[in-house]
Image (cartoon, helix red, strand yellow):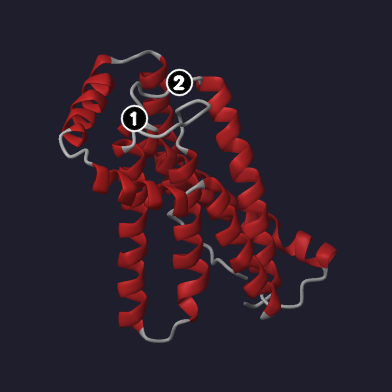
């Protein structure tokens, strides 16, 4: 199995989803506290806008785009499947498809308009950020499903830090380019974390049944 039973997993899921829904309610109701934080952070980033910074963050936002995130996950799926990790590969496919559906449903439900004066064009609704949501899933996949195969602990720790920094940079690029409000990227990371934990619970609950149906051979991965 990919994951082991963990008594804290349900608690984490509840905490994540509670914070996410609280944030969503505050956004939908145009809460002054959230709006104040968003505008304050946006004003800070406005002071560092320059042609070179725009080029750098535009490149980062492209590398962290939903399309690129899908490509990254598909490559990971292929490599894991090729090396006999069928359950890991199929689980990534499930969380990729279901996660994008969840993110889309939240977008069309909240219907939050994007910030004004966008530096580069961006269409669709603002909450949650697809870039941040997808990048969070990629980072979690690498940390929990790929890095464990690296034997040296120090290397795993360094790569984990790099991946977390990459997620933060992608989130910052969306705020800098005014594609999203700061609360959008925070909500996206919370939503991705929530869905990751929920999918782990589903995996543990239904693994045996699905493994028998799909005839997975690596039950003890």
Using the image as rendered, state which of residue 179 and residue 130 is in the foreground: 179
Using the image as rendered, state which of residue 28 and residue 51 is in the foreground: 51
Q: Picture quarter containing residue 51? A: top left
Q: Is residue 64 visible?
A: no
The image quadrant where one finds the N terminus is bottom right
How packed mark 2 is, by other alpha carbons closer than 10 Å (few <14, some 14-19, many 20 or more), is many
- The residue singled out by tag 1 in the image is 181
Q: Which circle's residue, 2 or 1, is located before the other in the chain?
A: 2
Q: Picture quarter containing residue 204? A: bottom right
Give percent across and percent down for residue 163. 37, 63
In the image, residue 55 above or below residue 209: above
In the image, residue 180 above or below residue 144: above
In the image, residue 42 above or below residue 73: above
Give percent across and percent down for residue 75. 61, 66
How packed mark 1 is, by other alpha carbons closer than 10 Å (few <14, some 14-19, many 20 or more), is many
Left or right: residue 100 versus residue 26 is right
Using the image as rendered, state which of residue 147 and residue 207 is in the foreground: 147
The image quadrant where one finds the C terminus is bottom right
- Give me the residue at 45% from left, 29% from top: 127
Q: Are marks 2 and 1 in contact (CB under 8 Å)?
A: yes
Spatial distance from mark 2 to mark 1, Cα to Cα?
10 Å
Secondary structure at numbered mark 1: loop
- The residue singled out by tag 2 in the image is 112
Give percent across and percent down for residue 6. 48, 60
Give percent across and percent down for residue 107. 53, 27
């Amino acid at each position: 199995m990919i994951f082991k039973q963990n008594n804290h997993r349900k608690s984490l899921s509840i905490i994540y989803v509670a914070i996410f829904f609280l944030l969503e309610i505050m956004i939908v109701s145009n809460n002054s506290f959230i709006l104040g934080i968003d505008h304050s952070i946006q004003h800070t980033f406005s002071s560092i806008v320059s042609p070179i910074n725009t080029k750098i963050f535009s490149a980062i936002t492209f590398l962290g785009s939903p399309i690129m995130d899908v490509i990254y996950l598909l490559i990971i799926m292929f490599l894991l499947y090729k090396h006999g990790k069928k359950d890991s590969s199929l689980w990534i496919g499930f969380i990729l498809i279901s996660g994008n559906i969840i993110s889309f449903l939240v977008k069309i439900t909240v219907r939050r308009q994007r910030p004004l004066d966008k530096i580069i064009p961006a269409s669709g609704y603002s909450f949650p950020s697809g870039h941040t949501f997808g990048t969070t899933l990629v980072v979690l996949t690498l940390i929990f499903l790929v890095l464990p195969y690296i034997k040296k602990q120090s290397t795993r720790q360094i790569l984990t830090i790099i991946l977390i920094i990459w997620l933060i940079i992608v989130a910052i690029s969306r705020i800098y380019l005014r594609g999203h409000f700061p609360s959008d990227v925070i909500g996206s990371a919370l939503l991705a974390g929530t869905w990751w934990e929920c999918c782990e619970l589903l995996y543990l609950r239904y693994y045996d049944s699905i493994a028998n149906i799909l005839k997975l051979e690596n039950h003890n991965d």
